[in-house]
Image (cartoon, rainbow, N blue to C red):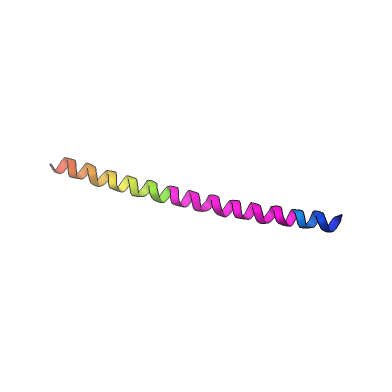
Amino acid sequence: MKARSARVTRGLSICRCRTANWWRGVKISMSLSAALIGSSRMKANTLDTAR
């Protein structure tokens, strides 16, 4: 019984770690896309004002 519970907790910790890594990747990609969108918007604004 003890060995089985240890295996379960190990599986849970691995899953939790993967989820944390996945979330980190999502947050990074979201911030990157937000930065890209922001910079392209700034470029568009400067182009509009230049006209």
Residue 46 in the image: x percent, y percent? 20, 44
Q: In the image, 16: left or right of 2?
A: left
> To which quarter of the image does residue 4 belong?
bottom right
Q: Is residue 42 above or below residue 3?
A: above
Residue at the image point whose x is 63% and y is 55% from the top: 17
Question: Compared to 47, does 4 lie above or below?
Answer: below
Residue at the right extreme of this rendering: 1
x, y percent for residue 2: 85, 56
Q: Position of residue 38 (x, y in %)?
A: 33, 45
Q: Is residue 1 left or right of residue 37?
A: right
Considering every residue shown, the one lying at the far left of the view is 51
Above or below 34: residue 17: below
Q: Quadrant of residue 21?
A: bottom right
Stretch in magenta: 9-30
Task: Say which residue appears at 18% left-offset and 44% top-offset.
Answer: 47
Residue 10 magenta: yes
What percent of the width, then of the height, locates residue 37?
A: 33, 46
Q: Main secondary structure of the magenta part?
A: helix
Q: Residue at x 81, y 54 (%)?
A: 5
Quarter of the figure that contains the C terminus: top left
The quadrant of the image that shows the N terminus is bottom right
On whether residue 19 falls in the magenta region, the answer is yes
